[in-house]
Each structure stands twice: as structure tokens, then as C-alpha cells.
Image: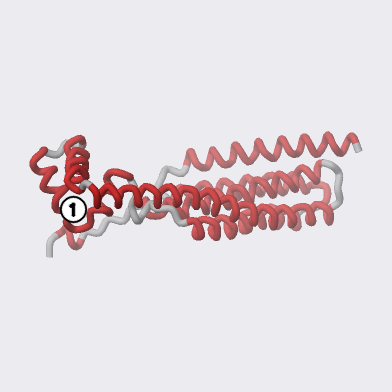
Amino acid sequence: MSRLKTHIERHAVNRIGWLRAAVLGANDGIVSTASLVVGVAASGADKAAILVAGAAGLVAGAMSMAAGEYVSVSSQSDTEKADLARETRELAENPEFEKQELAQIYVDRGVDPSLARQVAEQLMAKDALRAHARDELGISEETESRPIEAAITSAITFSVGAVLPLAALLAAPRQQMQLWVGLGSLLFLALLGYLGARTGRANPLRPVARVVFWGAAAMLVTAGIGSLFGAVV
């Protein structure tokens, strides 16, 4: 058996769709809920009121994430379907031109013109639409849009992320709620950045720094607003 048959490479590109939705959902769940909790706590509200606000933010945020992801990814999916329909029509109306177009794509990538023509002919003989979708439109099975998958993933991961600041709030003493939620949430964000990077097989340093920085900024802003409103009231 040849080494090509026994050597199977596993790439992270087929995880792009759900990984993006998962990281976005969990990050938004942690940041928005922690910021809400810290802001309400800074206004001087009692722990019960803060918990109610946080729980309401969890439910509303999960539904919003699911709806937003579904609408956004559906729009992308509609565009892909429209492009594929147009390509199907062009293949039916002018297959020879489409063959030349595909061959030129390979020539532009450095393939010899005669070989590029052979490759285009063989790929189109097997599955013309798939060949053009992948090499002309950049659409493949690994990267195609999946609205329902994105919506469900975002809603679940948002809820999981939002639970973490609420758990820190429950465990925190009354006088240290903001500190516990703030530090705990930054720790959760750092862990999320690390896990997301490792799942995507990327260096975790920059993702961790990104999520921690923006999470801290969001909590500081809402804490300032909460303090201001608390002082006014």
C-alpha cells in the first residue's frame, strides 16, 4: 500500500463554520453577561436583582445570537445558491467557454496550459459544477454555509458562556461581587481563547490576548456606567 493511501492529513478548515459560531457565542455569552452583572452591581443593586438581570440577559442573548446567526448565515447561503444556479446555467449554455475558463484558472496558478486543459476536461467530465464551485467560486463542502448548525451552536455556546459569570456571582461575597465576576470572567475568556486556538490548531497567544483585552474593556465601561447611574439615583 502506498504512503499516500496510509498517510491521512487532518486539517482544521472543515471546522471553520461551527468553530466560528462556537467561539463567537461563548465569547459573547461571557462578555455580555459579565458586563451586565458588573454594571448592575456597580449601581448598588442587591444580589437578587443582579441575578435576575443576568438570567434575563442569558435568555435574551441566546435567542438573539441564534436569530442573528441564522439570518446572517442564511444570507450567505442564499448568495452561494444563487452563484451555483448561475454557474449551472452557464455550464448548460456554454460548456466550452466554461472549460476554457476553468483551464485558465489553473494556468494562472502555474499549471502548463496543455496540462491545465486536460485537468479541466477530466474534472468537468466527473462533476463540472463541483469543479467550478470549488475553483472558480471558492465554495466547497468543508466551507459551505450551514445556517441551522450556526444558529444552534451559537445559542448553546452563548448560554454556556453566560452561565460562567452567573456562577461566579453566586459564589462571590456581597462586598466582592464585581471583583469575583470580573476576574473570573477574564479567566474564562482566556481559557476560551486558548481552547478556540487549539481546536483550530493556531498559536493561542494572540487569541487569548484579544478576548481578555476586549472583555476587560467591556466590563470597565459598563462598571463606569453603572456607577454613574447609581450615584445619580
For image coordinates 59% across by 57% down, the residue present is 155
User: Image quadrant of residue 211?
Assistant: top right
Tally the numbered discs: 1
Q: Given the current orientation, which residue lies at the most extreme right position?
A: 233
Query: In the rendering, at what x and y percent does residue 185 appear?
Result: 65, 48
Horizontal side of 24 relative to 126 (left or right) equals right
Query: In the rendering, at what x and y percent does residue 138 appear?
Result: 33, 45
From the image, tell me which residue sits under label 1: 123
Query: In the rendering, at what x and y percent does residue 15 appear?
Result: 41, 54
Query: In the rendering, at what x and y percent does residue 172 appear?
Result: 76, 53
Circle 1 — which element?
A: helix
Please state, as top left, top right, bottom left or bottom right, where the N terminus lies in the image.
bottom left
For image coordinates 19% across by 58% down, the residue present is 126
Please state, as top left, top right, bottom left or bottom right, where the C terminus lies in the image.
top right
User: Image quadrant of residue 209?
Assistant: top right
Horizontal side of 19 relative to 169 (left or right) equals left
Please state which of residues 80 and 6 is positioned toward the viewer in this rendering.
80
Q: Given the current orientation, which residue lies at the most extreme front position?
A: 93
Label 1: few (<14), some (14–19) or many (≥20) C-alpha neighbours in 10 Å: some
For image coordinates 64% across by 52% down, the residue present is 64
Can the viewer see residue 143?
Answer: yes
For image coordinates 22% across by 39% down, the residue present is 105
Amino acid bearing label 1: Leu
Please state which of residues 62 and 9 is positioned toward the viewer in this rendering.
62
Horizontal side of 103 relative to 159 (left or right) equals left
Q: Given the current orientation, which residue lies at the most extreme left position?
A: 114
Q: Given the current orientation, which residue lies at the most extreme bottom position?
A: 1
Can the viewer see residue 199?
Answer: no
The coloring applied to the image is secondary structure
